[in-house]
Image (cartoon, rainbow, N blue to C red):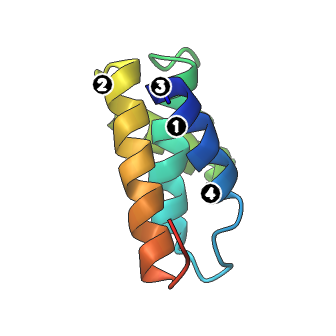
Amino acid sequence: MGLKEDFEQYAEKAKTLPDTTTNENLLILYGLYKQATVGAINTSRPGIFNMRDRAKWDAWKAVEGKSQEEAMNDYITKVKQLLEEAGMAA
């Protein structure tokens, strides 16, 4: 299976992560996912009163500069780690 197929498979597995997954880890996954699927961040930073979208934007900005392939690999690795920590099969 190719990288894109693996990435899509783990994107589906990420939806099964338990509710106990921390916001920090979810934001890391969000940033990597956006970098892998969209590429470089292409929007301006949301205003201070929109904290949720601002946190998501910051997570995406944090991985700026990674190639889409690198972001896909990092995303897969992170999902595997989180599934293992939750005692679920990766």
In the image, residue 52 sits, relative to residue 74, either above or below, namely: below
Check disc 2 and give the amino acid type: Lys
Q: Residues within 10 Å of mark 2 (few under 14, many from 20)?
A: some
Instruction: Give SS at disc 4.
Output: helix
Check disc 4 and give the amino acid type: Ala
Q: Residues within 10 Å of mark 4 (few under 14, many from 20)?
A: many
User: Can you identify the residue that label 3 sits on?
Assistant: 2
Task: Compute the Cα span from label 4 to label 3.
Answer: 18 Å
Check disc 3 and give the amino acid type: Gly
Query: Which comes sooner in the sequence, label 3 or label 2?
Result: 3
Task: Compute the Cα span from label 3 to label 2.
Answer: 19 Å
Check whether the beta carbons of the residues at disc 3 and disc 2 lie within 8 A of each other: no
Answer left or right for 11 relative to 57: right
Query: Which comes sooner in the sequence, label 1 or label 4?
Result: 1
User: Can you identify the residue that label 1 sits on?
Assistant: 6
Check whether the beta carbons of the residues at disc 4 and disc 3 lie within 8 A of each other: no
Disc sitting over residue 66 in the figure:
2
